[in-house]
Amino acid sequence: GGPPQPGFFAGLLGKAHDPLFVLNDPNAPNFTIPDLTLSPGVDASRMNQRRSLKHQLDQHFPEATSRPALGVAGFQERAFELLSSSVTQQAFQLSQEPEAVRQRYGRNIYGQSVLLARRLIEAGTRAVTIAWAPDANATWDTHGNNFKRLRGDLLPQLDMAVSSLLTDLVE
């Protein structure tokens, strides 16, 4: 809904530690992560051929990839890993969850985001952050109709998502 807020990036830790942003609604029936989807016409075999070609070029022209200013080798390798990892791909497939579980978390952007966060942690992600505000009018910083917004919109969704997450963590 707007520019990323302060604290969304890794700051002094460097770009290598910046997050992967999931900006699509995980509750949408056609939910996908375009950044983690192979382009049309590129299957896993073709991607692996490209990866092999990249490694061959890196070995043949080491000076082209060793300059600190480029610093993209780590990003490229991580991209290949994410695109080829079945564990990563499956973590984003919320449709694999039973409908009862999805309902329990809440069939809204927040509930499904918490469910997605749980699946990512189960798949090996070390940290997940959920920004609970798709736009400036849906935040916890209520300036009018506070009790109505909290009781009617914000708290029910939070209660469903967090209680479901805690139940799943205990189990």
Image (tube, rainbow, N blue to C red):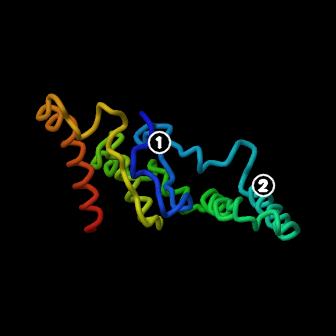
Q: Which kind of residue does numbered mark 2 sit on?
A: Arg
Which residue is under mark 2?
Answer: 46
Q: Image check: 100 left or right of 30?
A: left
Is the residue 129 above or below the residue 110 in the image?
Answer: below
Q: Quadrant of residue 169?
A: bottom left
Element at badge 1?
loop
Q: Where does the image place residue 135, in percent across and percent down from the top left? A: 36, 34
Element at badge 2?
helix
**Pointer 1 or 2: first along the chain:** 1
Mark 1 or mark 2, whichever is nearer to me: 1
Most extreme residue toward the top, as rendered?
144
Residue 23, numbered label:
1
- How far apart are labels 1 and 2 at the CA level? 28 Å
Most extreme residue toward the right, as rendered?
60
Q: Where does the image place residue 11, in percent across and percent down from the top left? A: 47, 57
Q: Quadrant of residue 154?
A: top left
How many marks the image carries: the answer is: 2
